[in-house]
């Protein structure tokens, strides 16, 4: 039997901010946990009073949108950060922008209520831009096969799942080169479509494409996920 | 020929296929990218192992910053790819490239290889090979970069003499600048490679192996070393800086996890303890300290520039830093509440160390490390690390009392004259420490014993000592495994085969270069990595070259043997080392040399420097300016050394 003794919460008041940032080329190969660390360090360099969890092994109070697979870039990552002071959003934005490392570009910031639902709870789908490095002659046919399939059973990490219901939209660009596929895939807890799985289903080696997360689709009733002004 | 753009294009296809591609991209915060076309001298700083390890190397960070501060030079980083990446690179002939601008290694003017330990030697060859640079110094032309190396292993440069054009013996901060100046001259006046090497040989601390040749005796030992060039000094005296330059504060912040993901701040260099097994303690003399203020300011700046959450205060013996309590207080006050973790390694076994760690309030209490190195008082006297068992147990009890649950104890087996009783004592001592813990915190108390195997190192009082054989090591490890089991006890040990490799190379001569080469050809690389280490490749290499590995490891060396590294001087005299070895055989210890100077040889060599840097900066006794010195020198007493010759 193990007991975890939780310390009594102190009187600290937190301010919660939601930010959108781009994860660009320089951080393409930085994994999810390392992005957390990069953010912790960024906030520390910006000299903002980052809140930490209480207890023996304090963690920074930071929460990221669903993990972006290694090698992908993104224009729309979201992060919630908790500070131990109420600093105007504009000031936080400037401080973070000045201390950003190559690979992180902050787009907007919004103060949100501390009681705001967590990021994964508000995200429904993610849109990806997939750019193929080599030209695939029969791409349209291949996509068509997928569109018409009733199910696409695949196995990943020893589990069988159906990719089909996770695909919400496929759109092919008209350009000859590079060929671009715009994809909307489900991005909910327990139901996440991966663009690399989609490519594999198309018979395209995933690493012969550049994959970019372009935007998230949110639950309709959520308001704080959007910028005050873009 | 590959241009940076070609390399970038190839990487685009390769990187998604390899493990941890983030190690191969560069582009991190605080990296320095200079204008390639308009910078005269390009230096590649190469650490011949993975990025994950190399990024923690302070030596590389120091040189990176120094070189990049110059208008006329740039420094970029190069690390070795892991085996999967190497295979991908070789498959498309992609050369090893620098992280900053993706230039192939061969495009640089200088390739500086860091060699802190011997198990990197085959990697260094692999690095040159992947970089498209001829492995042998003699095969390089004016077209190729100058290949230099430095680091603690190079105090015996001989096993690598064939592959490195010039070694920097000792501290590189000033030498690297002088080397850059010489390379600049060489590039500008179009003179020969030989001319460049001649000029380098004149620099203090630079060893050009091509200008020396050993003459062997019948028994395979060195008769003497000959110089082949008028500028080649005999011996080559190690380079030191009189005062430690300002610490590096602008560290590159890696985007992927690396070992020691922290800001390293060197609080002092050198050590006054004189542990006889310790290579670092002998070769980094004299002790030079930084001021508390300089250290605290450096931490402040580094935190600001990196955002990193852990700081390591580095030295060979933190407790011996003169103002250690003041430093710890200043640091913990200044950074309190900022969620900064501080590590303070190498603390002496005394309750004061627990006070020090206690003062670092923010630190996590994972484990407290003590390094008694040997378990009996007799053995600790032989190695000159005199600590009483009583004192050790008192310290342990205090550690458990203050909230730590795990004590890590570091020992070595294989010390000279060690018996199985001494090994048994390691197990007994671990259990005794655990028993202290149980008294204080009950079943939560833990002891982790790390028992490595002693490898005799050149330039130390134990350079004469035979290394244990694999059979002896097996027997001792067997005993420890049998004894150190049960709740709360954990044991770590080294593979004896890896110990052998370190032992051959540590005291190797020039003939070992061929063995290193053949081992690499037979597939040896990443020798420090258990999963890759290829003992068979090394055995094949010895067979092929016709050398007996035991000549380097288990042979009894006579007290007057001339060693292959004697033309390299650490300034600690052989006379001192001989005396200290003989003292050890009698179980006679030496006190900390701040209490009494034993005239190891540092002061006579660097007297001028010491007199120009008076006061506490150095921990050696003061030296008066030259005019007054003659009289003072005679006051240093050195005990007469009984000399045992080969006839005895």
Image (tube, coloured by chain):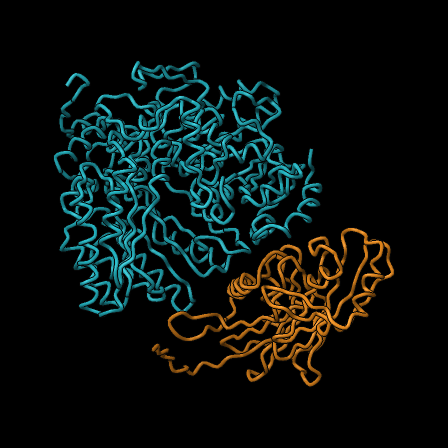
Q: Judge whether A218 appears above or below B213 on screen.
A: below
How many labels, in total? 0
Residue at left 50%, top 60%?
A: B307
Front residue (pair A111, B581): B581
Front residue (pair B68, B442): B442
Left or right placement of residue A131 versus residue B484 in this view: right
Q: Which chain is cyan?
A: B
| Spot occupied by residue B545 in the image (x, y as percentages of width and height) | 43, 22
Left or right placement of residue A52 versus residue B474 in this view: right
Q: Quadrant of the N terminus of chain B?
A: top right
Q: Judge whether A3 appears above or below B306 on screen.
A: below
Residue at left 32%, top 18%?
A: B220
Q: Judge whether A109 appears above or below B11 on screen.
A: below
Front residue (pair B582, B359): B582
Q: Quadrant of the C terminus of chain B?
A: top left
What is the quadrant of residue B470 in the picture? top left
| Spot occupied by residue B182 in the image (x, y as percentages of width and height) | 53, 26
| Spot occupied by residue B453 in the image (x, y as percentages of width and height) | 29, 42
Front residue (pair B148, A64): A64
| Spot occupied by residue B462 in the image (x, y as percentages of width and height) | 24, 33
Left or right placement of residue B218 versus residue A204 in this view: left
What is the quadrant of residue B417 in the picture? top left
Chain A, colour shown? orange
Q: Report if residue B203 is visible in the image.
A: no
Q: Report if residue B414 is visible in the image.
A: yes
């Amino acid at each position: 039997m193990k007991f975890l003794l939780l310390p009594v919460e102190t009187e600290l008041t937190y301010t919660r901010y939601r930010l959108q940032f781009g994860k660009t080329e320089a951080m393409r190969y930085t994994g999810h946990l390392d992005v957390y660390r990069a953010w912790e360090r960024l906030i520390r360099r910006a000299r903002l009073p980052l809140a930490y969890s209480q207890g023996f092994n304090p963690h920074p109070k930071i929460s990221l949108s669903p993990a972006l697979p290694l090698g992908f870039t993104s224009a729309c990552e979201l992060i919630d950060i908790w500070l131990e002071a109420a600093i105007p959003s504009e000031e936080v934005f400037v401080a973070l922008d000045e201390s950003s490392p190559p690979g992180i570009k902050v787009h907007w910031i919004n103060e949100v209520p501390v009681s705001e639902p967590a990021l994964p709870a508000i995200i429904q789908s993610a849109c990806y831009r997939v750019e193929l490095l080599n030209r695939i002659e029969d791409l349209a046919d291949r996509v068509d096969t997928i569109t018409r399939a009733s199910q696409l059973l695949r196995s990943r990490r020893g589990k069988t799942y159906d990719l089909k219901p996770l695909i919400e939209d496929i759109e092919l660009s008209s350009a000859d080169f590079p060929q671009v596929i715009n994809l909307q895939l489900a991005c909910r807890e327990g139901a996440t479509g991966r663009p690399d799985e989609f490519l594999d289903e198309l018979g395209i080696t995933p690493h012969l494409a550049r994959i970019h997360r372009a935007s998230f689709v949110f639950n309709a009733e959520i308001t704080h996920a959007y910028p005050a002004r873009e | 020929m590959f241009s940076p753009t070609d390399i970038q294009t190839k990487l685009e296809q390769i990187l998604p296929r390899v493990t941890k591609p983030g190690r191969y991209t560069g582009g991190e915060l605080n990296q320095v990218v200079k204008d390639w076309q308009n910078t005269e001298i390009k230096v590649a700083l190469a650490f011949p192992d993975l990025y994950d390890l190399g990024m923690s190397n302070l030596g590389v960070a120091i040189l990176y910053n120094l070189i990049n501060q110059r208008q006329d030079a740039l420094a970029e980083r190069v690390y070795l790819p892991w085996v999967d990446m190497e295979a991908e690179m070789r498959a498309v002939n992609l050369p090893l490239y620098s992280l900053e601008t993706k230039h192939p290694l061969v495009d640089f003017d200088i390739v500086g290889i860091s060699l802190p330990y011997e198990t990197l030697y085959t990697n260094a060859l692999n690095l040159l090979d992947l970089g498209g640079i001829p492995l042998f110094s003699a095969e390089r032309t004016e077209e190729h970069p100058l290949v230099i190396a430095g680091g603690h292993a190079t105090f015996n440069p001989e096993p690598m003499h064939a592959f490195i054009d010039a070694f920097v013996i000792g501290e590189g901060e000033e030498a690297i600048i002088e080397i850059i100046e010489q390379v600049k001259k060489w590039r500008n006046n179009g003179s020969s490679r030989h001319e460049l090497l001649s000029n380098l040989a004149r620099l203090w601390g630079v060893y050009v192996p091509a200008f020396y040749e050993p003459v062997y005796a019948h028994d395979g030992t060195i008769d003497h070393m000959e110089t082949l060039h008028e500028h080649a000094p005999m011996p080559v005296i190690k380079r030191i800086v009189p005062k430690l330059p300002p610490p590096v504060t602008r560290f590159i912040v890696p985007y992927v996890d690396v070992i020691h993901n922290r800001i390293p701040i060197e609080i002092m260099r050198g050590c006054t303890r004189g542990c006889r097994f310790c290579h670092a303690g002998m070769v980094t003399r004299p002790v030079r300290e930084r001021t508390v203020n300089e250290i605290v300011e450096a931490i402040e700046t580094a935190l600001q520039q990196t955002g990193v959450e852990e700081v390591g205060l580095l030295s060979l013996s933190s407790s011996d830093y003169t103002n250690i309590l003041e430093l710890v207080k200043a640091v913990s006050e200044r950074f309190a509440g900022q969620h900064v973790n501080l590590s303070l390694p190498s603390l002496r076994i005394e309750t004061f160390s627990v006070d020090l760690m206690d003062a670092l309030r923010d630190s996590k209490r994972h484990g407290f490390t003590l390094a008694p190195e040997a378990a009996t008082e007799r053995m600790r006297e032989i190695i000159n690390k005199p600590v009483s068992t009583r004192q050790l147990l008192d310290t342990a009890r205090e550690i458990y009392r203050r909230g730590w649950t795990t004590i890590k104890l570091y020992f070595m087996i294989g010390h000279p004259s060690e018996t199985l009783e001494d090994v048994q004592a390691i197990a007994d001592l671990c259990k005794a420490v655990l028993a202290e813990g149980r008294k204080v915190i009950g079943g939560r108390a833990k002891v982790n014993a790390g028992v490595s195997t002693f490898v005799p190192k050149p330039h130390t009082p134990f350079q004469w000592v035979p290394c244990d054989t694999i059979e002896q090591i097996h027997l001792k490890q067997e005993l420890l495994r049998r004894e150190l089991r049960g709740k709360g006890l954990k044991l770590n040990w080294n593979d004896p085969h890896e110990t052998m490799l370190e032992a051959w190379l540590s005291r190797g001569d020039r003939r070992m270069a061929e063995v290193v080469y053949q081992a690499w050809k037979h597939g040896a690389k990443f020798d420090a990595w258990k999963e890759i280490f290829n003992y068979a490749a090394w055995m094949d290499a010895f067979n092929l070259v016709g050398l007996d590995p035991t000549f380097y490891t288990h042979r009894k060396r006579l007290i007057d043997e001339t060693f292959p590294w004697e033309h390299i001087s650490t300034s600690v005299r052989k006379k001192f080392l001989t005396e200290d070895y003989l003292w050890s055989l009698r179980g006679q210890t030496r006190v900390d040399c701040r209490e009494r100077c034993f005239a190891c040889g540092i002061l006579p060599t660097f007297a001028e420097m010491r007199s120009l840097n008076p006061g506490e900066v150095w921990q050696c006794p003061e030296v008066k300016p030259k005019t007054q010195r003659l009289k003072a020198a005679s006051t240093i007493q050195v005990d007469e050394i009984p000399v045992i010759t080969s006839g005895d």
